Amino acid sequence: MKIECCGLTATQTKQIIDKEFADKVETLTDPDMIAARKVKAGEVDYYLGSCMTGGGGSLATAIMVLGYSNCLVVSKQGNCPNSQQIRHMVYSGNHKAFGYVKSHTEQVVPALVKALVDKAEGKPE
Amino acid sequence: MVTEFVFPQLLRTIVLVAIAAWASLLSHKCISNFNDGARPVFPELMEGRMTRPEFAVVVTGMGIGWVMAGFNQWLATGLIACHLILIATDCIGAWSPNKWVAIGLGAAYGLVCAYGTQGIAAVFNALPYNFLNDLTNITTPVLPIFCMYPAVAIAGQFGAKRGIISGVITAVVYIACTIIGKVTVGSVSVALYPYTFAMLAGMVCLVIYAVRASKKSEAVETSEEEENLFTKNAERIKGNWVYLCVQGALNALGIKVLAQAYQPIILASAITGGDMSIFYLAMIGVIFAFIPLIVSTSLATGVYQAVGLTTVMLVGALIPDSVWFLAPVAGFCVEFIEIQLLGLLGKGLAKFPELSKCGDHIRDAMISCTTIALLIGSFMAGNAIWGAVGLMGVGAFYTLNEVTGQRVPKTAIGPLAAVAVGILYNLAILLHLVTLG
C-alpha cells in the first residue's frame, strides 16, 4: 500500500507510519498538487493531510483533484475521534483522502492507517 | 494588553458592526468566508448537494472551536480578533434563510462583541482580585519565541542543521541589537528594535534556502480539467469584486482604528512595545505563508477568503493615524489587485508545487511558535495569579484536555486555564481560604 503524507505535519505523519507499518506501507511526501494527482491516477492508494482545521488546507487540493465525495474530514478542532470511531469511518466509506487537525496527528494517524491496512487485507471491522 | 485606544469607542463599534454585517451577508451568498477549513464545503451548498441546514451544521461544527480561540485572544490582548468576529459571521451567514436576516444578525453580533467585551472587563473590575492584569503575562513570551519561526520553518523543510544555524544567527542579531542600541548615520538616528531585526535575519535565511531549493524543483503540467475548474472559479470570484472590495475596505479600516485585529497577539505586543515595525514584518511572513492555502482553497471552490490574502491588514495598519480615513480606500484598491492576480497565483502554485510546500512549513512554524508561547505565557499568568497552585491548575487543565481528545483547541486551552485559575482564586478569597496580601 502506498500513502502520500501531506499538509502541515507531513514529516511527522511519515515518521509515524514508517515506524509502525514499515513492512506494509510505503510513504511518500510529494507536494499536495502532485500527491493528489498520483492518487487520482491510481499510482498511490491514499492521501493523508493535516492542517489547522482538519478540512481546509489539508484537503483543499485533494477535493479539487479527487472531488468532495472522495475526501473525509477525520478530525475537527475540538473533536478528535477515538480509534474505534476512526475505524468505523474508514469501513463505512470509500474515501481516498483523509484530513485531520495538525495537533491530532499522533492520535489519528496510527488508527487511520491500521484501519486502511486491515480493510485492504479483508479483515472485519 | 492594549487598554488605551487612539480612536473613540463609538467609531470602533460602528466599524465593527459594519464588518460583521457585511461578512455575514457575504458568507450567506457564498462569496467569501473566513474559516479556510469550511471553504471546501461551500460548493456542496452552491451545487445543491447539501441543504442549507445541513451545510450550516457542518460550518458551525468546524467553527465553534475557533470562536472560542478568538475569545481567548481577546482575554490575552484586549483586542477583538478576526476569529471572534468572522468565524461567527461564517456560521450566522450559513444559517440565515435570506440576506436581510444575515445582515441583521451579523450586525447584532458585532454590537454584542463590541459592548460584551466591555461588559466582561467591568465584571473583572468588580472581582475581589482583578486578575486581568496578570493575564497580560500570556503574551510576554510571544515576540521572543515568534522571532524564531523562520528558523523552525527552515528546520522543518531543510533539516535540523540549517535550522540551528538560522536560529543561532537570529539570536546573535538580537543580542547585537540590544548592545548597539542605536545607529546614527549623519543626522538620522535609527533605533534597532531587536525583535524586528532578529526576525528579519531569520526571514533572510529562509528566503536564501527557499530560493536555492526552488532552483532544483521541477515544473509540473496541469491537466485541462483542473485548468477549467481554476478558470471558472477565478471568474466567479472576479465577478463578485464589488462585494469583496467593500469587504477589503472595511477590514483595512477595522485594523486601522483597531475595531478588529488580525494576528492580535503579535499586534498587541507591537502596540504595547511601541514599535509597529515588528507587526509589519510579521505580516509580510504571514501573507507569504497563507498565499498557497488561500489561493488553493479559493480556486478550488470559487469562494474567497473574508480577509483576502491578508494584505489589506498590512496596508490598513500602515496608513498613518492622521489620515486614517484613507485606510478603506487603500483596502479597496489592494483587494481589487489581489482578485485580479488570483488566477495567475493559482497557475504559479500549480506549476511550482515546492513553493506551496514552503508556505506549509512557514505556517506550521508560526503556529507551533505561537502555540508554545501562549502555553508558557499561560503558566506565567497562572503563577502570577496564584503561585504554585496557579501552575498546578494550568498544568492540570492542559494535560486533562490532551488525554480527553483535545476538546479545546491547543492554542486556546492555556489562556482558558489561566482564566479558570483566576476565577478559582477569587472563589478562594470569597471562602476565606486565602487572604489578599
Image: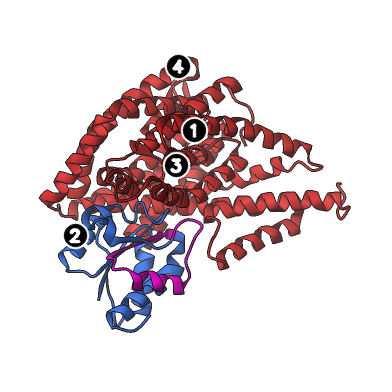
Q: Position of residue B221 (x, y in %)?
A: 12, 52
Q: Which residue is mark 3?
A: B95
Q: Position of residue A27 (x, y in %)?
A: 28, 71
Residue B126 to residue B360: above or below: above
Q: Earlier in the sequence, mark 3 or mark 1?
A: 3
Query: Toward which corner of the image does residue B154 lie, by quadrant?
Result: bottom left
Colour for chain B in the figure: red
Q: Secondary structure at mark 4?
A: helix
Q: Does the rendering let one see residue B401? A: yes
Q: Secondary structure at mark 3?
A: helix
Same chain, labels 1 and 4: yes
Dot 3: few (<14), some (14–19), or many (≥20) neighbours within 10 Å? Answer: many
Amino acid bearing label 1 = Gly
Q: Nearer the viewer, mark 4 or mark 2?
A: 2
Mark 4 touches mark 2? (CB < 8 Å): no
Examine the structure image and report whether residue B204 is included in the region drawn in magenta. Answer: no
Q: Chain of mark 1?
A: B
Residue shown at 31%/40% (left/top)? B303
Q: Secondary structure at mark 1?
A: helix
